[in-house]
Amino acid sequence: MNFLKRFSVLSVMMLVAVTMMAQELPKVYILATGGTIAGSGSSATKSNYSAGQVAIGTLLDAVPAINDVAYVEGEQVVNIGSQDMSDDVWLVLAKRVNELIASQKVNGIVITHGTDTMEETAFFLSLVTDSNIPIVLVGAMRPSTAISADGPVNLYNAVVTAASPASMGRGVLVCMNGKVYGAADVTKTNTTSVETFQSPNSGALGYIHNGEVFYYHAPDRVGRKFVDHVHEGTLFNEVRTPYFNIDGLKSLPKVGIAYGYSSVEGDVVDMMIDKHYKGIVYAGVGNGNIHKNVFPELEKARKDGIIVVRSSRVPTGATTLDAEVDDNKYEFVASWGLNPQKARILLMLALTKTDDWKTIQKYFNNY
């Protein structure tokens, strides 16, 4: 009987100790949206699979070491391949992120996501969330059933990144293949390789090694509340990124992308004009240059009140103001360092505030 009592007391003490340890760990909340990281295939060695098949609980069970890093909870927001990502899902996801931020009960947020549109979701969230806690997107290039699945280590590294005080004030991040990238500059550069995510213009912000994140430098663009955040003697004091409150939004303005190429016809933008799109992003050649067949159509679109943004299909460099195109004359907007897909996002959000092209250009100047 005494042994049983001692065993019972010991069990309670162990439970209390475990609970106290869990309370001391940072709390990281995971929002799952599907993608290859939750994909499943019939073969461990073939590339064919279906995305968004595995639930968040199963993903977490595959990486028990996460529990040594943070107290983790999660929920399934959607379970889709990110090729099917939509404005509606973005709004639901962003509002849930903002709810978690407002609760002040989490130290970091991880979002599992397909890689096809991960850079777009990351950039969207960077414009509609207002917090210095880490928000980290993570995915995989190989399904969970692959013999060398990269999802488990990516998920572990994402939790490490989200749980680290060093990640505070660095904006929305993407964590893939042992590297950490900023939302504004990261892009997918390869269709299948695990090192697909890169920031060609600015490089990675940091890397993860032995369960710890190390940063090379601060992001070029920091968020609204980061102005007073001090980390390791560095004051993030340049507030550049615009913020868009989406609390009352049920939809986003329609904005499309037209792609430039040799011999392109002007009708490449006709559908968007006829369907009354609010904005058109032209993925031009070179420094956002516009083919002579398309130029008159974009002039017409602008006269019809449609905002026209010049971006470029070139993967590096900026689309600059008033280069070969007189933007002021035609009332076009230059996207600067944003690629076409990210320019579309900023334009959609800008159009929720204004349809003045000069004001919208200022948003692009200061993204």
Image (cartoon, rainbow, N blue to C red):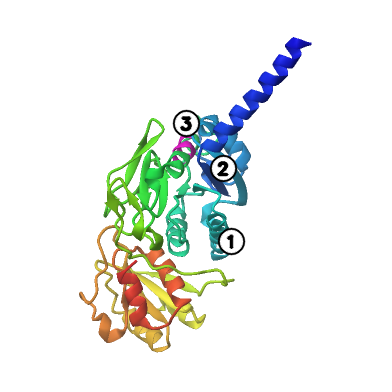
Is 211 in the magenta? no
How many dots with numbers?
3
Mark on residue 20? none
Residue 277 in the image: above or below residue 109: below
Question: Bounds of the magenta span?
Answer: 153-158
Question: How many residues crowd around disc 2 within 10 Å: few (fewer than 14), some, or many (20 or more)?
Answer: many
Mark 3–mark 1 CB contact (< 8 Å):
no
Is 156 in the magenta? yes
Residue found 32% across the figure and 80% down from its top: 332
Mark on residue 148? 3
| Circle 1: residue type | Val
List x then y, in percent, for residue 153.
46, 34
In the picture of the structure, the residue carrying the numbered disc 2 is 38
In the picture of the structure, the residue carrying the numbered disc 1 is 92
Give the residue at the far front of this rendering: 2
Mark 1–mark 2 CB contact (< 8 Å):
no
Specify whether 244 is left or right of 215.
right
